[in-house]
Image (cartoon, rainbow, N blue to C red):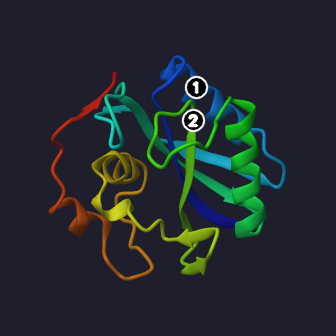
Amino acid sequence: MIDCYIALGSNLEQPLLQVNEALHQIDAMTHSKLICSSSWYRSKAIGPGKQPDYINGVCKLSTELKPLNLLQALQNIEQQQGRTRSQRWAARTLDLDILLYGNQIINLPELEIPHPRMQQRNFVLYPLYEISGELTLPDQHSLQALLEHCTQTGLEKLS
């Protein structure tokens, strides 16, 4: 079993309901076990046009699935919840991203791990820190050090 971290986000069709349902679906995945999840956070949308705020969080998953099989399982959950891929960074019902897969570095056309933009995104780093504060990334950067350079501007932890 390999420990992985998955980012969850939604800004369409009842986002809080979407991410909670996704967490339930991740928990039900075969050959995997949901270990824990962060609080939910509200963040400003990054992308084209005016979009509603996002609800974001991170979960830790222990899995036997290989990286591409995990990606496919997560994309299946996205599709079940109405995800369409029309435009990069467009509003979406659900976005599931593999942030980390053990301590592996993976560079494939369809999958990059660690997630290439996670270090610049407060809506990823803060929830990740909440569940795994002592984490060190494969490039040897500590999560704590990354947070020292990451503002909480536009990020609101939900109760």
The image shows residue 99, relative to residue 48, as above or below, that is below
Q: Nearer the viewer, residue 105 or 130?
A: 105
Disc 1 element: helix
Separation of residues labelled 1 and 2 (CA atoms): 7 Å
Residue plotted at (75% across, 32% down): 80
Q: Name the residue type under label 1.
A: Gln
User: In which quadrant will I find the N terminus?
Assistant: bottom right
CB-based contact (under 8 Å), mark 1 and mark 2 = yes
> Which of the two residues, 88 or 143, is positioned nearer the viewer here?
88
Q: Measuring 53% from the left and 71% from the top, which residue is drawn there?
A: 113
Where residue 27 appears, x then y in whole percent? 71, 40
Left or right of 36 in this view: 65: right
Q: Which residue is mark 2?
A: 94
User: Residue 105, relative to residue 7: is it above or below?
Assistant: below
Query: In the rendering, at what x and y percent does residue 45 appear?
Result: 33, 36
* Furthest-top residue in this view: 14
Q: Residue 100: where, in percent of width, then height?
A: 53, 66
Q: Secondary structure at mark 2?
A: loop
Of 51 and 138, nearer the camera is 51
- The residue nearer to you, when weighing 74 against 133, is 74
Quadrant placement of the C terminus: top left
Amino acid under disc 2: Leu
x then y, percent, for residue 103: 54, 77
Name the residue tied to disc 1: 18
Q: Residue at x 70, y 48 (%)?
A: 75
Which of the 4 image quadrants contains residue 144? bottom left
